[in-house]
């Protein structure tokens, strides 16, 4: 049964990192902004996300902001969504780490004919 459940799982995890802004708690603790994205590989929709923020509220909020975004709509729409809702010194670092994760996702997905 476990093998069958694994085969039904159509999501993958990808990560991305970018330098965090100096003078922020994120920089003091982590030095980098980081994201882990769970993406449905059939639809290219972000299912879930987790960021290296200091507070649970910030992690939960930004995850909800980007959940459900269809990556086929392009990154600029996602960056605009983040800028409209997340007003912090680390906004551009967040966008940079999301960009890195999404680039990795499409690089791997497009590099193999069977999509792993």
Image (tube, grey):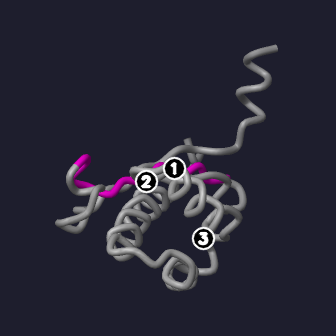
Q: Residues within 10 Å of mark 2 (few under 14, many from 20)?
A: many
Q: CA distance from mark 2 to mark 3?
A: 15 Å
**What kind of element bears circle 2?**
strand
**Residue identified by numbered label 3:** 71
Q: CA distance from mark 3 to mark 1?
A: 17 Å
Residue at position x 75%, y 16% from top? 2
Q: Nearer the viewer, residue 51 or 1?
A: 51
Mark toward the start of the polypeptide (3 vs 1)? 1
State the predominant SS element of the stretch in magenta.
strand
**Residue identified by numbered label 2:** 35
> Can the viewer see residue 1?
yes
Q: Quadrant of the N terminus?
A: top right
The extreme left residue here reads 22
Asked if residue 35 lies in the magenta stretch, the reply is yes
> Which numbered marker is on residue 50?
1
Q: Nearer the viewer, residue 2 or 56?
A: 56
The extreme top residue here reads 1
> Can the viewer see residue 112?
no
**What kind of element bears circle 3?**
helix
Q: Is residue 22 above or below residue 17?
A: below
Residue numbers of the magenta segment: 29-40
Q: CA distance from mark 2 to mark 1?
A: 6 Å
């Amino acid at each position: 049964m476990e093998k069958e459940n694994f085969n039904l799982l159509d999501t993958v995890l990808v990560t991305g990192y970018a330098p965090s802004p100096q003078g922020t708690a994120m920089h003091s603790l982590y030095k980098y902004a980081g994201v882990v994205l769970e993406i449905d590989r059939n639809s290219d929709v972000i299912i879930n996300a987790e960021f290296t923020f200091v507070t649970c509220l910030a992690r939960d909020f930004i995850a909800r902001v980007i959940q459900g975004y269809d990556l086929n709509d392009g990154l600029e729409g996602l960056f605009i969504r983040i800028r409209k809702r997340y007003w912090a010194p680390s906004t551009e670092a967040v966008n940079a780490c999301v960009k890195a994760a999404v680039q990795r996702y499409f690089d791997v997905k497009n590099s193999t004919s069977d999509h792993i």
